[in-house]
């Protein structure tokens, strides 16, 4: 069962708690089965003002709204990343391939973690949906915050809030490792949607029928008018899960004195585990022997110096910043790390998780294509080739437009991006997918070469047989029969009598081109006797029985 949180006076208080959930999803067109479109945001845009999702106006387009914060964000990244994120004015590159739509009408999130803990109300900063040109990936970003939150509740929030659906159910019927209840609230406090983690009858039959997981009711409401693939709801677009049911996250926590946090506290924050006593570790000492080297970035952290009080934690799934509430360097929303957390580091995480989700999508596309291939069915082979070529073209565009090993030359951003991608293992996944795409390409090339070789063999056989007839009837330009004085009808009759055997001969030669080709090779082989050569020719009419 979920253990109730026990508050004690010594529990540190998070003066400002902010969390961003990132949920990568696969977008699916509902126009036709297997249809692929490049601009998935257009169905939302076509709904106009009645749609709860409205496109975000880019501040980079209006010099009057452009501030220093935007400038600092822009110069953080390398030029090719800048073009990916923001486009490049009137150049040949054009607009950014990213489109962002923001959800209206949701102002707060009320969470009940368990029966013994009072509800926590989070202020929703914004809810955005990120689209990427020509890539069937969308990313939902939900940012919310609150103040003066006990550390145990902050750990509970990080551990439980980003759950698309329960992985199991407790003995009391509650969703395992999920909040007891989550509500979306309007600005007036009206309840708009409520979670249904406890209703296992919404999840078990769905998986049994569709072999695909259902999602919680409040997430389903949030994404409307998009609809879950396999669900009974209609939507302008469909979506389905790409990764694990736990959503990747970013978290920002400020304390009066972050140095009071223990190694166990930092381990729980970094590895995103359930709450626990500060005097204990979430895992064994042996498991956490290299915790600081693997998961902590301590360029501005020193437990013995109050000057260095900012610490970065990263395990791939979670990116956490911890610092001092009284330090303007850490808390300033524009020039401090809070502003960087919400913008630069958010974009760094967005890029990394977009990379991983897209690579997993490519792998899924390739697996689906090969699973539907039937080499005995001509239409299946054509569909397979068409799909593989589409995937190859899309992968080529992804590699040259979206794939980055480095995003910044600023040491801190560069190091944290490397740390993040190392834990996500995106470089290895990219190499695996690239190898799979190349194998498919080699298969298509070898198949094309095989077909071309077969065509050349047939043409060679027909040409050889035709050469014999040509030499026989056209030697020295003489005609065997002189029919120039006959009527046209007789000439047509003779032409038909010659044409039909010629057509039959060519068809027969093409149908037996393989054996005839073998005969020509045997004829040129001086080591074979004439009887051996004749046996090769006789295979046209007599084929030995295969042994069972």
Image: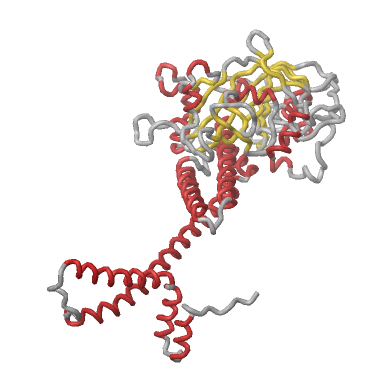
- Residue 174's place in the image compared with 104, above or below, is below
Q: Position of residue 5 (x, y in %)?
A: 83, 23
* 420 or 528: nearer the viewer: 528
- Residue 313's place in the image compared with 180, above or below, is below
- Residue 535's place in the image compared with 23, above or below, is below
* 123 or 64: nearer the viewer: 123
How many numbered discs, if any? 0
- Residue 98's place in the image compared with 486, above or below, is above
Q: Is 253 displayed left or right of 11 in the figure?
A: left
Residue 83: quadrant of the picture: top left
Is residue 446 visible in the rendered structure shown here?
yes
Q: Position of residue 44 (x, y in %)?
A: 50, 24
Locate the C terminus by quadrant: bottom right
Residue 247: quadrant of the picture: top right
Locate the N terminus by quadrant: top right
Q: Position of residue 179 (x, y in %)?
A: 76, 25
* 378 or 39: nearer the viewer: 378
Q: How is the image coloured?
A: secondary structure
* 28 or 358: nearer the viewer: 28
Q: Which residue is at 59% across, 14% downward?
A: 105
Q: Which residue is at 16% across, 75% downward?
A: 483
Is residue 15 visible in the rendered structure shown here?
no
Q: Which residue is at 41% across, 31% downward?
A: 95
Q: Is 441 displayed left or right of 458 in the figure?
A: right
Q: Residue furthest left?
A: 485
Residue 519: quadrant of the picture: bottom left
Q: Position of residue 529 (x, y in %)?
A: 45, 91
């Amino acid at each position: 069962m979920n253990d109730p949180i026990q508050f004690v006076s010594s529990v540190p208080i998070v003066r400002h708690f902010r969390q961003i959930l990132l949920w990568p999803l696969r977008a699916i067109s509902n126009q036709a089965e297997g249809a692929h479109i490049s601009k998935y945001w257009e169905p939302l845009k076509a709904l106009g003002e009645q749609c709860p999702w409205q496109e975000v106006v880019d501040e980079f387009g209006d010099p009057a709204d452009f501030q220093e914060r935007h400038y600092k964000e822009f110069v953080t990244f390398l030029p090719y990343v800048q073009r990916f994120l923001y486009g490049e004015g009137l150049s040949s590159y054009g607009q950014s391939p990213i489109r962002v739509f923001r959800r209206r009408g949701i102002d707060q999130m009320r969470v009940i973690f368990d029966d013994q803990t009072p509800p926590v109300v989070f202020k929703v900063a914004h809810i955005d949906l990120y689209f990427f040109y020509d890539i069937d990936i969308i990313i939902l970003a939900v940012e919310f915050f609150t103040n003066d939150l006990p550390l145990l509740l902050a750990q509970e929030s990080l551990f439980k809030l980003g759950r698309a659906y329960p992985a199991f159910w407790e003995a009391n019927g509650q969703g395992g490792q999920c909040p007891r209840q989550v509500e979306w609230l309007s600005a007036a406090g009206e309840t708009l949607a409520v979670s249904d983690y406890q209703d296992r009858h919404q999840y078990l039959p769905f998986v049994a029928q569709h072999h695909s997981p259902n999602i919680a009711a409040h997430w389903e409401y949030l994404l409307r008018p998009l609809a879950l693939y396999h669900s009974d709801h209609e939507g302008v677009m469909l979506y389905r899960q790409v990764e694990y049911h736990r959503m990747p996250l970013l978290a920002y926590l400020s304390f009066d004195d972050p140095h009071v946090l223990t190694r166990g506290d930092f381990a729980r924050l970094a590895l995103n585990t359930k709450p626990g006593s500060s005097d204990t570790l979430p895992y064994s000492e042996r498991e956490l022997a290299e915790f600081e080297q693997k998961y902590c970035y301590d360029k501005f952290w020193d437990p013995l110096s109050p000057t260095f009080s900012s610490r970065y934690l990263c395990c791939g799934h979670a990116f956490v910043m911890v610092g001092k509430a009284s330090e303007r360097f850490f808390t300033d929303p524009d020039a401090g790390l809070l502003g960087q957390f919400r913008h630069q580091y958010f974009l760094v995480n967005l890029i990394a998780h977009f990379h991983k989700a897209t690579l997993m999508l490519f792998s899924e596309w390739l697996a689906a294509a090969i699973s539907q291939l039937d080499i005995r069915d001509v239409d299946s082979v054509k569909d397979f080739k068409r799909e593989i070529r589409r995937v190859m073209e899309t992968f080529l565009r992804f590699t040259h437009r979206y794939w980055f090993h480095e995003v910044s030359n600023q040491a801190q951003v560069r190091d944290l991006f490397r740390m993040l991608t190392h834990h996500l293992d995106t470089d290895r996944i990219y190499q695996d997918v690239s190898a799979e795409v190349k194998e498919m390409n080699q298969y298509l090339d070898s198949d094309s070469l095989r077909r071309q070789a077969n065509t050349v063999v047939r043409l060679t056989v027909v040409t050889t047989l035709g050469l014999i007839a040509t030499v026989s009837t056209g030697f020295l330009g003489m005609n065997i029969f002189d029919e120039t004085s006959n009527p046209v009808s007789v000439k047509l009759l003779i032409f038909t009598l010659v044409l039909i055997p010629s057509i039959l001969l060519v068809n027969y030669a093409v149908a037996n081109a393989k054996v005839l080709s073998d005969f020509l090779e045997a004829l040129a082989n001086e080591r074979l006797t004439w009887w051996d050569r004749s046996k090769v020719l006789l295979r046209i009419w007599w084929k030995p029985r295969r042994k069972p």
